Image: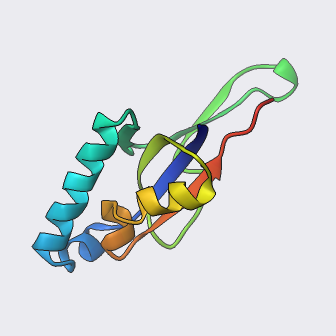
Amino acid sequence: MAKFITIGYGDRAGYESTAEVVREAAHTHDARLREAGAVMGAAGDPVRVRNHDGAGTRTDEGPYMRSDLPVAGFALIEAADIGEATRLVSQTPCAVAQGVVEIWPLTAP
C-alpha cells in the first residue's frame, strides 16, 4: 500500500453552513479511517524553522503556505493508489463542509 499525506483546508463558517447530518457522517467516516490505521489530527498554530547553511536555527510564528482557507488538519493514510486515496478523503469533514483536501503521495527517497 502507498502512503499519502492529506491536508484539509476549511473554516468554521463553511463547516457550520453544512447540514449537521452531513457533518456527522463525515466525522463517522474519519473515525473509520482512524480505526483502519490513518493517523489524523487537527492543525494547531504553525512555526516556520530555518537553519540556512547550518549557521543557526531561526523560528518564526505563522504559516509558510498561504491559501484562501486555513489549514484545518492533516492525515497520513494508506491506499492502493491516488484514486483510492481520493475516494477515502472525499467524505471527510473538510471535503464535504465547503473546504478542500490536498493529497500528497509520499515517495521513497
Residue occupying the point 44% across, 43% down: 75
Residue occupying the point 83% across, 19% down: 54
The foreground one among 51 and 93 is: 93
| Residue 13 horizontal side relative to residue 65, left or right | left
Q: Point out residue 4 in the picture as x, y percentages from the top left corner.
A: 58, 44
Q: Indicate whether 44 appears above or below 49.
A: below
Q: Indicate whether 8 appears above or below 32.
A: below
Residue occupying the point 28% across, 35% down: 35
Colour scheme of this structure image? rainbow
Q: Point out residue 49 in the picture as x, y percentages from the top left corner.
A: 64, 32
Residue occupying the point 43% across, 56% down: 88
Can you see residue 65?
no
Q: Point out residue 91 in the picture as x, y percentages from the top left corner.
A: 34, 64
The foreground one among 82 and 57 is: 82
Splitting the image into 4 quarters, where does residue 57 fall?
top right
Q: Indicate whether 16 appears above or below 101.
A: below
Please, which residue is most extreme toward the left here? Answer: 20
Q: Point out residue 1 in the picture as x, y percentages from the top left corner.
A: 59, 37
Q: Quadrant of the C terminus?
A: top right
For the image, the number of numbered tags is 0
| Residue 29 horizontal side relative to residue 46, left or right | left
Splitting the image into 4 quarters, where does residue 50 fall?
top right
The foreground one among 55 and 70 is: 70
Q: Indicate whether 63 appears above or below 107.
A: below
Can you see residue 17?
yes
The foreground one among 93 and 69 is: 93
Splitting the image into 4 quarters, where does residue 39 fall?
top left
